[in-house]
């Protein structure tokens, strides 16, 4: 029997202990192309995808609730589930992670305003690492077809890092998932620029978290070009950009497949210079069903561990893609209890039988040579010139100096921005102007000076150019009630403002915290005296800018296509 006195002592002891929580998980770091824990043991990702899936869209299957309506003609999801903010669910699910024997979960979206302490500490205390994608649906990621690397997206990524930096169990931050597609490779330089800037930010915070990317599978030449482009030796360039962790979403192992299924991949990646893993695996619609996960003993066998560092099985929660059902658990209607299925039991058996191959020894590992950057070719129409580091101060300076300001009539303005950029560029083009300043072209490597700014600033820049080209006639700054004249702007004009605010775009990350996030989505007014420092990061359509097509500027609203999120669950 325990006396109340000793109980009180215990409680006091706990209170004293809790603020100085000891590191629950060992630090994982990269040596050459392998991962090691502090004690020098090889680290393998034995993981599962942990992300609630939302509703379908016309693009693919997307995470998040779709709010259809005039503001969202493309039916893209506008919300998402932040599973790492749901401490009760993490506590509920931990015993199942432990039954599976996973040491890592991969989550695809986090809201930096929410509290993740409960879930992250539950996981950390259980020795479970997190691979977190920094992207969000809709405008919170680099767009596949109209890519940009702009202040709003950079700031969102930095805010998420700021929110997670205090946790000891963040293994990696992914800067994108399946953004570069076989049919659309132009986003690749933007992804590498993001890797460069996120790496610099993590270095500035003395963070050892890895910078990752999760690639879509495809033909071997496509997979190789993407992998090499992301990892290649850019040591001669400012920022030294390269990812630290390459993920391949790979579903080629189907059912009770032949043990040589991965041979092609193994030889393809035999000399790859950065750690590689399967960021998603576990093909559905195979025989036998439930899934037998016979790839697991192969993936963790010495025949593969020289090349690969494990993988994340897809998926804990129910997730469907193209008619296939991937989930391993179902929740009761009140979310309180979990029921597992045969996929879960089989995966648990395979994962628990894994014995990590503890070689090569860390002391023997040298930095593996990085691949050469793939040359621009018709089969790989991608420039090796990277876009600059987005600069909030320069873009804010520009916004304050512009004469005709985008003033959205609705807080949900992200679709409107794309549409209006198309309209404004069309009008300005007819007037003999060009939208090159706000464009960004990953095929030619030509980046307009304003291309790094928030889309609302890009729009304001073109509004101002058009207004000024019409000799500042008041009706040239109307845009059906979406624009307003900024009389504080002065008379030097938009081009002069650009030259003076952004004299030389640079690829060097300037250490700065992201601007404070103001929940009310109002873009910068252009009036430097009215709260102008806080809202410059409020952005819009995925950094989407128009792409010049023979002098005719095409509106983006019909061409946004599937954002990175849209291909989240895609199989080839
Ligand atoms: C998907 O849509 C259905 C019907 O519109 C809705 O009941 C359900 O809650 C949605 N699911 C999610 C995860 O948003
Ligand atoms: C993040 O959470 C806050 C607080 O609930 C909410 O106001 C905001 O809209 C969320 N942000 C996103 C991008 O979902
Ligand atoms: C690139 O990184 C390497 C290794 O970290 C470092 O030695 C080199 O100085 C860097 N180069 C540039 C141009 O930053
Ligand atoms: C898988 O295939 C092997 C060899 O073809 C066979 O021995 C084994 O029984 C099969 N397992 C299942 C679960 O079908
Ligand atoms: C494991 O690798 C060894 C050689 O490294 C090979 O002989 C064996 O067949 C492999 N086992 C599996 C399950 O892949
Ligand atoms: C169950 O959890 C999902 C995902 O977190 C959430 O969207 C849903 O609202 C929850 N349902 C209930 C009844 O709490
Ligand atoms: C990158 O290239 C530089 C210059 O050619 C070379 O000195 C360096 O060793 C290379 N680094 C790697 C990791 O391949
Ligand atoms: C703003 O622009 C959109 C797109 O052209 C248009 O539909 C709308 O009527 C304009 N005005 C207002 C007040 O929304
Ligand atoms: C700028 O903001 C200040 C302070 O709110 C206000 O007095 C001024 O009229 C504004 N100027 C313009 C052009 O909106
Ligand atoms: C600045 O923001 C504060 C708080 O959001 C608001 O109360 C105030 O009216 C704003 N000032 C101007 C000039 O917009
Ligand atoms: C996306 O657009 C909304 C307004 O619709 C804005 O509040 C949010 O900050 C934008 N996010 C990014 C990353 O640009």
Image (spheres, rainbow, N blue to C red):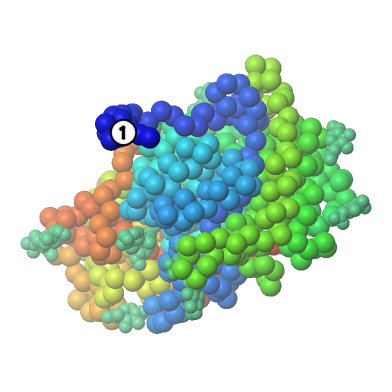
Instruction: Give the class, few, some or many, for how many residues have Cα within 10 Å of label 1's Cα (few <14, many ≥20).
Output: few
Q: Front-most of 99 and 439?
A: 99
User: Of residues 366 and 91, which is closer to you in this image?
Assistant: 91
Quarter in which the C terminus is drawn: bottom right
Identify the residue at image location x=29%, y=77%: 479
Please state the horizontal and vertical placement of residue 254, each as a whole percent of the image: 80, 57
Could you tell me which residue is drawn at 33 percent across and 53 percent down?
Answer: 113
| Residue at screen point 73% across, 47% down | 349
* Image coordinates for residue 240, horizontal then vertical, percent: 52, 32
| Residue found at the very far top of the displayed protein | 363
Quadrant of the image containing the N terminus: top left
Residue 423 is at least partly visible in this image: no
The answer to whether one can see residue 107 in this image is yes
Left/right placement of residue 384 relative to residue 446 reads right
Q: Is residue 130 left or right of residue 315?
A: left
Disc 1 element? loop
Residue 415 as seen in the image, left or right of residue 131: left
Q: Image height check: is 64 above or below 274?
A: below
Label total for image: 1
Q: With respect to residue 372, does 437 lie above or below?
A: below
Q: How far across and down, in percent of the image, does residue 6 sit?
A: 30, 30
- Taking depth in this image into account, of 450 and 282 the one nearest to the observer is 282
Q: Nearer the viewer, residue 115 or 281?
A: 115
Q: What residue is disc 1 on?
A: 3
Give the image location of residue 218, x and y in percent.
73, 56
């Amino acid at each position: 029997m325990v006396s109340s006195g000793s109980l009180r002592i215990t409680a006091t002891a706990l209170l004293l202990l809790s603020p100085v929580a000891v590191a629950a998980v060992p630090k994982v770091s990269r040596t050459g192309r392998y991962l090691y824990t502090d004690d020098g043991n090889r680290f393998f990702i034995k993981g599962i995808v942990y992300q609630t899936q939302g509703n379908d869209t016309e693009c693919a299957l997307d995470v998040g609730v779709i709010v259809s309506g005039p503001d969202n003609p493309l039916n893209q999801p506008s919300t998402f589930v932040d599973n790492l903010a749901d401490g009760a669910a993490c506590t509920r699910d931990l015993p199942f992670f432990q039954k599976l024997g996973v040491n890592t979960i991969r989550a695809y979206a986090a809201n930096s305003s929410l509290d993740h302490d409960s879930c992250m500490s539950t996981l950390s205390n259980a020795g479970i690492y997190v691979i977190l994608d920094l992207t969000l649906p809709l405008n919170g990621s680099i767009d596949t077809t109209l890519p940009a690397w702009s202040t709003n997206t950079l700031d969102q990524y930095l805010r998420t890092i700021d929110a997670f930096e205090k946790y000891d169990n963040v293994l990696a931050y992914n800067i994108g998932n399946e953004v570069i597609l076989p049919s659309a490779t132009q986003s690749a330089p933007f992804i590498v620029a993001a890797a460069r800037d996120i790496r610099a930010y993590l270095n500035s915070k003395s963070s050892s978290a890895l910078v990752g990317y999760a690639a879509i599978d495809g033909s071997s030449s496509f997979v190789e070009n993407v992998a090499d482009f992301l990892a290649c030796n850019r040591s001669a360039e400012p920022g030294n950009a390269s990812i630290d962790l390459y993920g391949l979403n790979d579903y080629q192992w189907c059912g009770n497949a032949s043990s040589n299924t991965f041979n092609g991949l193994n030889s393809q990646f035999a000399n790859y210079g950065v750690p590689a893993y399967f960021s998603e695996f576990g093909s559905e619609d195979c025989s036998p069903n439930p899934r037998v996960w016979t790839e697991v003993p192969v993936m963790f066998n010495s025949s593969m561990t020289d090349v690969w560092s494990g993988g994340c099985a897809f998926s804990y929660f129910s997730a469907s893609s193209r008619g296939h059902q991937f989930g391993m658990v179902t929740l009761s209607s009140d979310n309180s209890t979990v029921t597992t299925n045969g996929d879960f039991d089989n995966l648990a058996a395979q994962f628990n039988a894994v014995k990590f191959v503890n070689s090569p020894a860390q002391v023997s590992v040298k930095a593996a040579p990085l691949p050469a950057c793939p040359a621009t070719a018709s089969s790989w129409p991608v420039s090796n010139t990277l876009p600059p580091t987005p600069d909030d101060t320069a873009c804010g300076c520009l916004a304050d100096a512009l004469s005709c300001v985008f003033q959205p009539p609705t807080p949900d303005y992200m679709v409107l921005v794309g549409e209006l950029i198309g309209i404004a560029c069309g009008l300005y083009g007819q007037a003999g102007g060009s939208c090159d300043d706000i464009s960004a072209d990953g095929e030619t490597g030509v980046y307009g000076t304003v291309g790094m700014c928030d889309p609302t600033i890009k729009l304001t820049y073109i509004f101002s150019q058009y207004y000024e080209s019409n000799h500042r006639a008041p009706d040239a700054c109307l845009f059906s009630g979406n624009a307003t004249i900024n009389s504080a702007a002065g008379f030097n004009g938009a081009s002069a403002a650009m030259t003076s605010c952004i004299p030389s775009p640079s690829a060097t990350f300037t250490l700065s915290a992201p601007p404070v996030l103001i929940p009310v989505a109002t873009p910068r007014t252009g009036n430097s005296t009215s709260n102008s420092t806080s809202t410059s990061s409020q952005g819009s359509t995925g950094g989407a800018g128009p792409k010049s097509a023979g002098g005719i500027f095409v509106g983006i609203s019909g061409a946004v296509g599937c954002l990175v999120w849209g291909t989240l669950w895609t199989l080839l």
